[in-house]
Image: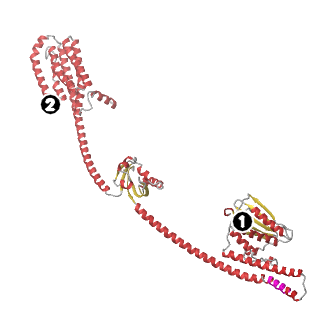
Amino acid sequence: MNKARKNKLKRLIEIGCIPSDTPEERLKKSIMTIMVIPYALAAIIWGLYFMRNGFTTAGTIPLAYAFVSFTSFFHFINTKRYNIFRFFQVFLVLVLPFLLQLTLGGFSQSSGMLLWSCTAPFIALVFYDIKTAKKWIGALLLLVVLACLLDESARSYFPEEIDENAIVLVYGANFILISILLFGIQTYFVNGQRKIKIQLAEKEDLLKASREIERQKELLIASKDRLELVMGSLEEVVWGRNLPSYQMQYVSNSVLKLYGFPMADWYEKPNLWLDMIHPDDIKRVKKEGESLFTDGITLLEYRIITPDKEIKWISSTTKILKSTDGTPFLMTGIAQDITARKKIQEQLNNLNNSLEEKVKERTIELINSEEKLKKSLVKEKELGELKSSFIAVASHQFRTPLAIIQSNAELIEMLNKTGVKQEPEKYTTVTSRITTAISKMTELIDDVLTIGKLTSGKVSCNPKEIDLIDFCGKMVEEFNAVQLDGRNIDFVYSGDIYQPYLDSKLLEHSLSNLISNAFKYSVGNEKPELSINFKPKELVISIKDYGVGIPENERKHLFEPFFRAENVSEIQGTGLGLSIAKEYVEVNKGNIVVKSTLGKGSTFEITFPKERI
C-alpha cells in the first residue's frame, strides 16, 4: 500500500478524533471506528440470515443493532461526543446478543449468541479503564445468570426448531467472527499502545533534550549577561552581524557614545553604519569591504559624520567567521575612536610640513642669494669689461672729434690774428665741423649712459595698447624722408591684425637702430624691407637689408657692447646700437635673432609671444 492510500485510510480511521486528543484517546477512538463497522456488518448478515430462515423477530434485533450503531457513529462523527457513542456500543454488544438468544429459543437453539455479549468487557477494557471494565464484567455475569434462568422459558416460548447443521454452522461462525474481531481489536490496540510507548519515549527524549536546551540557554544567557557586562565597560564598540542578511546580532552599549545612535536603531537599520561614513572615505571603505570576504579580516581607518554633524576618526578591525563548509555566517568586529590621535598626528604633520617649508624657504633664500651674488659678480665683470671697452673706444672715438674741434679752433684763432676781416662762409664751415664733432661725441656718451642703465636694471617697461601698423608707418615715413640716396624702405604686413600691449618708446628705439643700420650697411644695393606678421601665437617684426652681411664666426658677438664686425670697420659706428636694441627688445618681453649671409644681406627678427602682449 502506497503512502497516499495509507494517509487516506488513517484519516478515515481517525475521522472521529479532534486535535486536542491525546495519543491514547486517538487510539481508542480509532479502534471504536474499526470495531463499529465489522460489528454492524456482522449484525446485518445475521439479521438477514435469520429473516431469510423465517425468524423475523430474531432478525429484527441484529438489524436494530446495526441501525443504532451506524446512527450513533454518524452522530459521533458530527458532534465528536465520544462518551455517548462509547457507552451505546458496549451496552448494545452486551444486551442485544442476550435478547437475540432468547428469541431464538435459548442458548443451544441460538448457537451460543450470548458469546457476543462476552466481548463487551473486552471492549470496555479497551475504551475505558480496568475499573470500569470490571463493572461491565459484573453486568455480563448477571446477564449470563439471567440467560440460564430464562433458557427453559425461552425454549418453550420460542419453540421453533432450527436445523442442527445450521446450529453447528452458526456456532462455528460465531466463534470465528468473535475470535477474529477480538484478535483484530486487541492487535490494533497492542500495536497502538506500542506506538504510544515509542512516542512517549521519543517525547521523553525530547523533553530531556528540551530540558538540556533550557539549561544551555540559561548558561548562554548567563554568559551573555557577563559578556554584555564586559562589553558595556569598554569604550570600544563590539558588534556582530548575521550573514548574508547583514542583520545586527549584537552590539555593545558604547555604540551610543561613539556613533550617536541608540542600540535599537542599529538592530532596525542594517545600513545605518554605511550611511554615516564620510563621503570622501566611502569609496575606499566599500573597496576594502569587498576584499574582506577573500582575506577574512580587514583593518580600516575612516571618518564618520555623527547626527550632530561632528566628524570622528574610527579605527576598526572586522573579521568573517565561516562554517565548516566555508560558508560565511557571521561578521564581527571592534571599533574605537581615534579622533584625538588623528588630531595629534595632524598637528605633528603640520609642524613637520611647516619645518619643511621653512627649510625650503631658507634653501631658496640661500640659492637666491647665491644667484644674486653670481649675477652681481657677472654684472661687475660686465661693468669692468664695459669700462675697459669704453676706455678703449673712448680713446679711439673721442680722439677724432677732439682733433677736429682742436684743429678748427686753432684755425679760427689764426684767422683772427691776421687782422683781416674774413668772409662769414669760412667761419660757418669751421663751426659746422666743430658742431658735427660735438654731436658725435654726445651720441657716443648717450649710448654709453644707456648701456649703463640697462646693465644696472634701471630701465622700466610701461606697456600700452598701440596701433602697430600706424606706429611703424610713421617711422617708415620719417626714415624715407631723410634718405639722401633716394631709397625707401618697403613696409608690408600680414595676418589677423590686433593691437598689442608694448612700450612704444623702447620699441621705437629698437626699430630705429635696426632700420638705420639697414640703410647704413646696404648703400648702393636694394632698398630695405620692414614686415609685420600677426601670427596666431606670436607677433613677428622683420627688418631685412641686402647689404654687406655678417661673417658667420662673428655673429655670436654681434649683440655685445662695443663689438663691430671686421667687414664694417670703415663704416662709422660705436658698436653699441645693436646691444641697446637687443636689451630694449628683451625689456619689452620680446626676443631678437639675426639671419645673415655674407655679401648678400641680413634679416633681424623681433618676436613677441602673444600671451605676453
In the image, 86 versus 427, the foreground residue is 427
Magenta part of the chain:
401-411
Residue positioned 12% across, 11% down in the render: 157
Which of disc 2 and disc 1 is earlier in sequence? 2
Residue 20 lies in quadrant: top left
Do we see residue 434 in this rendering? yes
Q: Amino acid at mark 1?
A: Thr
Cβ atoms at labels 1 and 2 below 8 Å apart: no
Residue 120 lies in quadrant: top left
Residue 166: x and y, percent?
19, 15
Residue 365: x and y, percent?
56, 73
Classify residue 60 as left or right of residue 469.
left
| 133 to 373, vertically: above or below | above
Residue 535: x and y, percent?
72, 60
How far is disc 1 from disc 2 in space, using C-alphas?
A: 131 Å
In the image, 544 versus 18, the foreground residue is 544
Classify residue 421 as left or right of residue 534.
right
Q: Which residue is mark 1?
A: 607
Q: Which residue is mark 2?
A: 130
Residue positioned 27% across, 32% down in the render: 19
Q: Amino acid at mark 2?
A: Ile
| 121 to 570, vertically: above or below | above
**Residue 409 lies within the magenta run:** yes
